[in-house]
Image: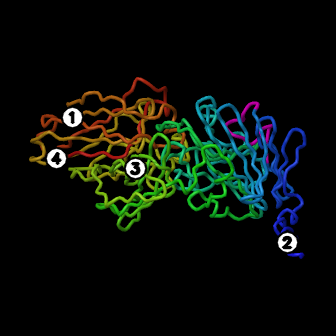
């Protein structure tokens, strides 16, 4: 007759183990205790997280700033709900106009799950900022996010030069973080405490797998960790509306975060019944499998990506045979793009249905410019300036340094001679006001000079409508139109990623020298009616150049 009460006690055991589990209302905040080492406060006025205490130490905040969505919301409706099924949970819901933000915790876990549903442009940015106190986490003065005291601003208010002459910015991420597809989390550890912000799957974000954006900021007053869901710097993708997340603030005892929390690994089924606006359960999703990719060029990573106005996904193809899979896809019609490194070499349209696989047969890329046999080629077609001057190896220095940084080689290395000069001596970036009018010397055979030739210059990004025009000996090309690129800074804030574009110039046979022993002279000139001066003059990021 004691069995039923015993089972009841066992069912309640988590609550009995930690009397701290739960929440209280102090009048201004909901004070939430996860029943372990983490206690935090959420403002009842605007949903800010204004205190984060882990292991008895306060980590949150500096200069009166809190951790929050965007740069902080105004007066909001903030409610709190506790659950005992499917697990012991607490959910805070913050409603600010058309934006709904959720803060969720599970019993005994030192993790804060965050989700944000943004409905329109009434809120400007799309990000979450974790504000951390200064001098709690470790710093190395060589790190790309460290600001030395006495740093001087050199561009806008967010690029500085420190006391050693090194340039620093919250935009520059260095070797640890680069493209979205390259990292699962951002953060640091003291060895005894780890503070991590684990990114979401970015299915409602913009920019695709290669998008680069700020993920952290450090200064003498404090530091930030970011989850960027839409950011206009160098952005060419439209903003997507709807639910972003979960992304997770995770505290550990010095370890890196649990891999089970990574978006590519996590089981989110326990969210299915929590009433999250815009939530799509795994059971209502489908997936894509690709049999393979033929004619893959050795040494390059191939990525298959899906996109439509509402969602984006990607998966890396196997190096042997090119098989790939893309999981947890919301049903719909998508553009499938296959990238050789970061260059689009194949596109098609596919439809994904719920609860099943969309199986694709072997793909043969049909848009790889390197398939054209060239007379000469500088670099290779991969959608990056990799291999060129200042991009000789990864991580590319201009992704974590301002172009003016003295650690970079001069952007004007001298003229280039085909067959003699290495690609690493050809500038990866060119600006109208910095290294314009670059010369390339080349020779042609008697047979080659008898017909028209094509010179192609591929770019991955352009700033201020920058584009190349050329002359060959005494012949000058027509002026090309600007490509479609992002409308804000790019080359100076650590990104070369824009829209790949090829400028093709038809050069008549009469332009070439008839003496095959002489060097033809190709001059590349960056033109634009936009931009200002120096590194903010019109510029381009170069992918490849060839003649055929």
Residue 70 shown in magenta: yes
Number of other residues with Cα within 10 Å of mark 4, as a class: few under 14, some 14 to 19, many 20 or more:
some
Residue that label 3 marks: 351
Indicate which disc, 1 or 4, sits on the residue closer to the N terminus: 4
Residue identified by numbered label 2: 4
458 to the left or right of 390: left
Q: Secondary structure at mark 2?
A: helix
Residue wearing tag 1:
473
Q: Are marks 2 and 3 in contact (CB under 8 Å)?
A: no
Q: CA distance from mark 1 to mark 3?
A: 51 Å
Q: Nearer the viewer, mark 1 or mark 3?
A: 3
Label disc, if present, on residue 444 of the rendered structure: 4
In the displayed structure, does residue 358 sit left or right of residue 512? right
User: Taken as a whole, is the magenta stretch helix, strand or loop?
Assistant: loop
Task: Check contact, mark 4 vs mark 2: CB within 8 A.
Answer: no
Between marks 3 and 4 in the image, the one whose residue lies nearer the viewer: 3
Closest to the observer: 29 or 481?
Answer: 29
Give the CA distance from mark 3 to mark 4. Answer: 49 Å
């Amino acid at each position: 007759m004691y069995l039923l009460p015993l089972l009841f006690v066992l069912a309640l055991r988590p609550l009995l183990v930690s009397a701290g589990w739960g929440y209280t209302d102090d009048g201004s905040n909901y004070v939430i205790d996860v029943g372990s080492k983490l206690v935090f406060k959420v403002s009842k006025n605007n949903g800010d997280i204004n205190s984060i205490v882990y292991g008895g130490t306060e980590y949150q905040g500096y200069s009166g700033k809190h951790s929050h969505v965007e740069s902080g919301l105004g007066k909001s409706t903030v409610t709190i709900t506790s659950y005992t099924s499917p697990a012991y949970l607490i959910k805070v819901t913050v409603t600010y106009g058309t934006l709904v933000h959720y803060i969720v915790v599970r019993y005994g876990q030192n993790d804060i799950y965050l989700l944000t549903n943004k409905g329109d442009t009434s809120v400007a940015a799309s990000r979450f900022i974790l504000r951390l106190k200064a001098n709690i986490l470790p710093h190395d003065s060589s790190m790309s996010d460290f600001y030395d005291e006495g740093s001087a601003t050199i561009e806008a208010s967010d690029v500085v030069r420190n006391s050693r002459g090194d340039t620093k910015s919250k935009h520059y991420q260095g070797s640890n973080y680069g493209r979205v597809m390259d990292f699962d989390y951002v953060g640091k550890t003291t060895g005894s405490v780890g503070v991590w912000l684990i990114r979401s799957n970015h299915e409602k974000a913009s920019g695709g797998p290669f998008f680069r954006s700020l993920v952290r900021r450090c200064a003498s007053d404090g530091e930030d960790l970011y989850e960027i869901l839409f950011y206009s710097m160098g952005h060419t993708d439209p903003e997507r509306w709807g639910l972003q997340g979960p992304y997770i603030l995770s505290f550990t005892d010095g370890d890196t975060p649990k891999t089970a929390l990574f978006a590519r690994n996590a089981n989110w089924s326990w969210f299915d019944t929590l009433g999250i606006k815009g939530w799509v359960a795994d059971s209502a999703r489908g997936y894509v499998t690709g049999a393979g990719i033929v004619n893959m060029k050795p040494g390059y990573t191939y990525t298959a990506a899906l996109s439509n106005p509402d969602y984006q996904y990607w998966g890396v193809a196997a190096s042997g045979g090119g098989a790939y899979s893309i999981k947890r896809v919301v049903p719909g019609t998508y553009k499938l793009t296959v990238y050789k490194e970061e260059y689009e070499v194949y596109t098609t349209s596919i439809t994904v249905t719920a609860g099943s696989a969309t199986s694709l047969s072997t793909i043969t890329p049909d848009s790889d410019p390197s398939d054209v046999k060239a007379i000469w080629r500088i670099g290779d077609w991969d959608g990056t300036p990799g291999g060129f001057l200042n991009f000789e190896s990864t991580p590319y220095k201009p992704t974590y340094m301002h172009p003016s940084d003295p650690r970079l080689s001069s952007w004007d290395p001298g003229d280039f001679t085909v067959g003699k000069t290495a690609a690493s001596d050809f500038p990866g970036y060119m600006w109208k006001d910095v290294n314009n009018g670059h010369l390339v010397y080349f020779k042609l055979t008697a047979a080659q000079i008898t017909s028209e030739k094509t010179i192609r210059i591929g770019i991955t990004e352009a700033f201020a409508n920058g584009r190349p025009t050329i002359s060959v000996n005494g012949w000058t090309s027509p002026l090309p139109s600007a490509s479609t690129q992002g409308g804000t800074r790019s080359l100076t804030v650590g990104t070369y990623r824009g829209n790949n574009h090829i400028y093709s110039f038809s050069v008549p046979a009469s332009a070439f020298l008839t003496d095959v022993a002489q060097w033809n002279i190709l001059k590349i000139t960056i033109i634009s009616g936009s931009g200002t001066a120096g590194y903010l003059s019109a510029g381009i990021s170069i992918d490849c150049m060839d003649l055929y």
